[in-house]
Amino acid sequence: MKKNVARTKAGFQGRLHFQPEAPEPASAPKEPPAPKELRRATAESLAQKQREISVSEFFSKNRHLLGFDNPQKALLTTVKEAVDNSLDACEEAGILPDLVVEIRQLSETRFVMAVEDNGPGIVRPQIPKIFGKLLYGSKFHSLKQSRGQQGIGISAAGMYGQLTSGKPTRIWSRVSSDRPAHYYEIRIDTNRNLPTVVKDEKAEAWDRPHGTRVEIEMEAIFKKGRRSVDDYVQQTALANPHASIRYLNPLGESFEYPRAASELPVEPREIKPHPYGVELGMLHSIITASRAGTIKRALQREFCRVSEKVASEIIEKAGVSGSKRCRELGMQEAEALLKSIQQTKIMAPPTACLSPIGEQLILEGLKARLPADFYTSTSRSPSVYRGNPFQIEVGLAYGGSLPAEEPMELYRVANRAPLQYQQSACAILRAALTTDWRSYGLQQPRGALPVGPVALFVHMASVWVPFTSESKESIAHYPEIIKEMRLGIQECARRLSAHLRHHRRQAEESKKRSYIEKFIPHIGIALGEILALNRAKQQEVVSLLTETLERSRQ
Ligand SMILES: Nc1ncnc2c1ncn2[C@@H]1O[C@H](COP(=O)(O)OP(=O)(O)O)[C@@H](O)[C@H]1O
Ligand SMILES: [Mg+2]
């Protein structure tokens, strides 16, 4: 502050240098001590601080993005990541999955979760990277339906375990019965996003002929009820009728979900990207990186549904030479190609990359799980958003002992994996909310789900489910997706409405019949008295009346 005074003085006196400060007289009032001057950063000092951020460091700070925002959810997310991987691996290897899910409690807030499968196992050199490095996986680059996508699941779960318990991830894996099983302990070096192998040894005692077991110790909370691991495992069994799951929870309860279908789902095929789904930068980098030689051949080779004829049409409209080398494609030419792609009629992508659950199995699953008295299901035909094929399946259960006074129960499933959290952000909720349930005979408060004994199951199968975050809890609001969901829901709701109308008619009829049965004998007696009929005549009149009324009722 003093310096400022001096500066002002200097300025006031029209001089550019500082005045030396005169010593203060002893009697002058004491001023508060001057604060230390703020040292401003310079480009150089900033440069010293600038450095790369490792992806694991990023996600350890932002663990909520991966579904580890509280100890209860962290436990569910960990189980989910491990179960997703086990089911994916078994299906890819053509093995009917036999899973064991175990959660043991060590202390009030410390748990160990273990998931074991009979899958193909993991080869030794891959183990450290899979469990000790984020963004490492086999599914990110392939356009094929699978539960995992980003290559972030199991390593992130291991990282959470390590951060909260200090313990490494423990893995047992065996690739075939003529090779020994191996046991590993893997840590993740979060600063460098690299694995550290703590242990790697033979595990003779592990007797599965092939498969993998993952154990993660972590801080967690186990709760029953909605969004519990119990619920999740049950819904996983519903969406995966071909899997057999044994589940032991920390309360000592065990649940067996035997497989309801003895065949594996149709194996999804990998496809190439569809031209309608690419953006400029991606188109440019796909073509320049292609080994097809010319731009025209690259279009045919790197994308699906581009025949020789379609490629010629695209190139011609764009005014680009088809025989130009891939490497030489400029950004402006790429832009012209993209415009031309959008104006060219190209067949929808092949749908063999999808593996829906199927109407029959959805129906069987609902019947096994929900005590209703009406069930229906539908599989829509495949559709496309942003060039990605997807397929919507819907199941509905009504009546029986489902709670009659509560809002509809919604089961959301993406690529056969149940979604538990963030319902309010999900396209499935939007589709259910914007369906006019009143026109199908249900009560629906404004802006809410219908109320009644009804449960709705919606499955989205796709090569790329557009999740709203890395924790994969809700599906983004693409209009094409919501439209398909609504159409599927409406189809099931129409069948429900027919069932309800039939039911109501039957109820009315039986009410009428009971009136007839109740009052006609009395009419018979009265007529008998008025007309002085004998008993036989009176009986005859009663039968005649009943017959006439029955006929008119029908
Ligand atoms: N139980 C398992 N059996 C066989 N392979 C597995 C298993 N778990 C994980 N993997 C392999 O490790 C990779 C990384 O898994 P993950 O980090 O969960 O990412 P993502 O599932 O998204 O690919 C998978 O892509 C898969 O190839
Ligand atoms: Mg995974």
Image: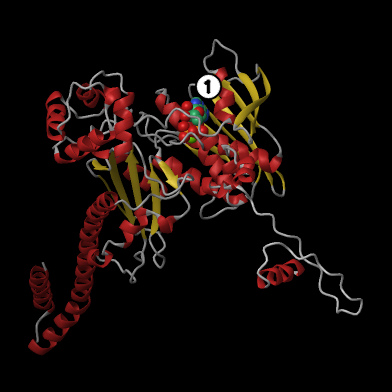
In the image, residue 271 above or below residue 382: above
Q: Position of residue 414 (x, y in %)?
A: 38, 43
Query: Which residue is outermost to the top?
Result: 178
Between 236 and 309, the one lying in front of the other is 309
* Quadrant assignment, res 28: bottom right
Helix, strand or loop at mark 1? loop
Depth order, front residue of 395/342 = 342
Residue type, mark 1 in image: Ile
Q: x%, y% of residue 350?
A: 23, 32
Q: Report x, y in % for residue 155.
A: 56, 34
* Disc 1 CB within 8 Å of nearest ligand 1 atom: yes
Query: Residue at label 1?
Result: 122
Residue at screen point 51% across, 55% down: 226
Q: Position of residue 467 (x, y in %)?
A: 41, 46
The image shows residue 360, relative to residue 311, as above or below, that is below
- Tell me: residue 300, above or below residue 8: above
